[in-house]
Image (cartoon, helix red, strand yellow):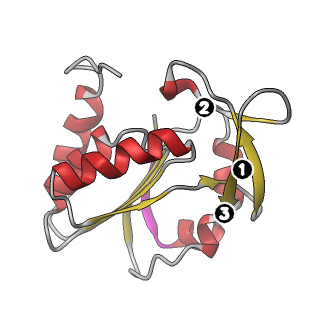
């Protein structure tokens, strides 16, 4: 998938102004990792980025991009994030940045976890970025404890 270089420039400018070395970022809906890798460059080796991507093929691209960039501070979770721990179906559109959780129809079955049930041990989260094509409410419903430790929630 080709990405225009300026596609996320506003997001990255915000990241540059807000994030600091050593910060912790949770990126829900990381896609191929453009913003997760941008955050990793800013938080550095002393920081951490938790990157969640539900679609298995896209999560594979994310893992490869993290490895190619030697971003050891990025941990990839090939999971959907929501309000319950269960299996869900994600669409399988050609434009992978538009995939979404669907009740029925064509798609791919994936595991969904609540953020509160994923081990994120750091006591403070500088930034929780969410870009999940209309599923934001469910991400937040499963993240009550994490939200209490989070300074800023950033919706794409």
Left or right: where does residue 11 sit relative to residue 91? Answer: left
* Residue 133 among magenta residues: no
How far apart marks 3 and 1 lie (CA) works out to 11 Å
* Disc 3: CA contacts within 10 A as few (<14), some (14-19) or many (>=20): many
Count of numbered labels shown in the rendering: 3
The C terminus lies in quadrant: top left
Position of residue 14 relative to residue 111, above or below, is above
Left or right: where does residue 132 sit relative to residue 82? Answer: left
Marks 2 and 3, the one that precedes in the sequence? 3
Residue at image x 55%, y 70%?
146
The N terminus lies in quadrant: top left
Marks 1 and 2, the one that precedes in the sequence? 2
Q: Which mark is residue 133?
A: 2
Q: Which mark is residue 138?
A: 1
Q: Which residues are magenta?
A: 149-154
Element under disc 2: loop
* Disc 1: CA contacts within 10 A as few (<14), some (14-19) or many (>=20): some
How far apart marks 2 and 3 lie (CA) works out to 17 Å
Q: x, y percentage for residue 131? A: 51, 38
How far apart marks 1 and 2 lie (CA) works out to 11 Å
Residue 22, picture quadrant: bottom left
Is residue 90 in view from this perspective? yes
Element under disc 1: helix
Element under disc 3: strand
């Amino acid at each position: 998938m080709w990405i225009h270089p300026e596609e996320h420039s506003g997001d990255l400018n915000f990241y540059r102004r807000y994030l600091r070395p050593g910060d912790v970022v949770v990126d829900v809906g990381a896609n191929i990792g453009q913003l997760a890798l941008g955050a990793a460059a800013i938080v550095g080796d002393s920081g951490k980025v938790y990157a969640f991507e539900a679609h298995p093929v896209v999560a594979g691209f994310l893992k490869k991009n993290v490895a190619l960039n030697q971003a050891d501070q990025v941990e990839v979770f090939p999971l959907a994030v929501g309000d319950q721990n269960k299996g869900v179906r994600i669409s399988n559109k050609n434009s992978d940045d538009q995939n979404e959780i669907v009740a029925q129809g064509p798609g791919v079955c994936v595991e969904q976890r609540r953020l509160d049930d994923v081990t994120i041990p750091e006591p403070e989260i500088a930034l929780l970025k969410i870009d999940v094509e209309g599923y934001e409410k469910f991400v937040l419903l499963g993240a009550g404890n994490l939200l209490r430790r989070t300074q800023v929630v950033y919706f794409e």
